[in-house]
Amino acid sequence: MSRSSGLTPVPANFFAFAFGLAGLAEAWVLMAVFGRVSSHVADALSALSALAWLLVLVAYLRRVVTDLATVSRDLANPVTAPFLSLAFITPMLLSVLGLYSYAPGLARTLFYVFLGLTVLLGSWLTGQWMYGPLEADNFHPGYFLPTVAGGLIGSDAAAVIGERGLAEVLFGYGALSWLFIGSIVLGRLLLRPLPPGPLLPTFALLIAPPAVATLAWFDLHGGQIDTVIRMLGGFGLLMILAQIRLLPAYLKLPFMPSTWSFAFSWSAVAAAGIQWLQVARPAGYQPEQYVVIAASSILVGAIAIRTALAACRGQLLPSQPATLDARGLAG
């Protein structure tokens, strides 16, 4: 159908709204598991994340119905394509995070369905990137999402439901993807100019892989601090401290939907930090866990409130579809 349907396109990066909320829910789940808080907050965040995912999915599919080329165009867009994976990764995570305790059979089914879709899309995109030439300047940390985030989050979820063999396979899928994609991403960021403003918040995604890998490894190996965990912690510390140098660039940015890149990334760091504190048990570790969860909740809450205000003012979606089509993102 024609693209002149009058509907403002819903960018693929809008799926990051639910993804960020799911990341915060995971941190609250850990607090509940360790007996620090009630599980009600985690359940509410999981439900809110599911609602956000559903609303974005319906809006996106509405556009697909009126413009059948939407999906193929987004998949072919070197900027947009990685973010489409969040349409599958988020419900995969939520099926275990928010549903498994109440309906394990249904949760397992949904997990396997969305895991399969995540792996298929991530693998297809990897083949697409091999098949079609990619310009270095189009490469950004969002490329971690389809295979690195998909594999490591899938590994963590599989370990939680007792699928150890599957969890190990997925850990390899995600960790080795992180190795080769991460080297390209860092090379591009080190050697090329900064990406456009709407992509700058994706720099926060650099801190997510070591945090998510830490959570998966903890669940695979009984929550022990071993050599792998220490190595992940070392690289994670490097990426976190590097963010300090990026603050001047971040502070110049206006609010954008891509600001949600901060939500999942820092929530994953918070969850990994809470787990570390629980296992290591340094002096004062329990108050420190509350500080960590409060800080991540304030960050995500502020982003959510700003998003709601932008939506109420009609500022969330771009006013000119042509701008969106050029980069594939809402700025």
Image (spheres, helix red, strand yellow):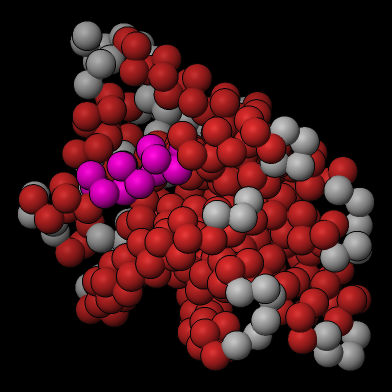
Residue 261 x/y as whole percent: 51, 55
Which corner quadrant of the image does residue 179 belong to?
bottom left
Residue in front for this viewpoint, 191 or 99? 99
Question: Above or below — where is 271 with respect to 256?
Answer: below
The residue nearer to you, when weighing 272 against 240, is: 272
- Range of the magenta residues? 114-125
Rendering coords of residue 85 (x, y %):
39, 43
Q: Is 60 rendered above or below residue 290?
A: above
Residue 52 position within the rendered picture, expressed as x and y whole percent measured from the top left: 61, 32
Q: Is residue 120 magenta?
A: yes
Q: Is residue 195 left or right of residue 219?
A: left
Q: Is residue 36 visible?
A: yes
Give the quadrant of the N terminus. Answer: top left
Identify the residue at horizontal 91%, vertical 63% (top origin): 36
Main secondary structure of the magenta stretch:
helix
Q: Which residue is painted at 82% across and 59% down in the image?
A: 33
Taking the image as shown, residue 173 lies to the left or right of residue 290, namely left
Rendered residue at 27%/24% (across/down): 70
For the C terminus, the quadrant is top left
Image location (x, y in percent) of residue 90: 53, 42
The total number of labels drawn is 0
Residue at the (76%, 80%) spot, across then down = 279
Q: Is residue 22 visible?
A: no
Is residue 122 located in the magenta-colored stretch of the structure?
A: yes
| In this view, 15 is above or below 23 | above
Q: Residue 64: name its quadrant.
A: top left
Left or right: residue 292 versus residue 66 is right
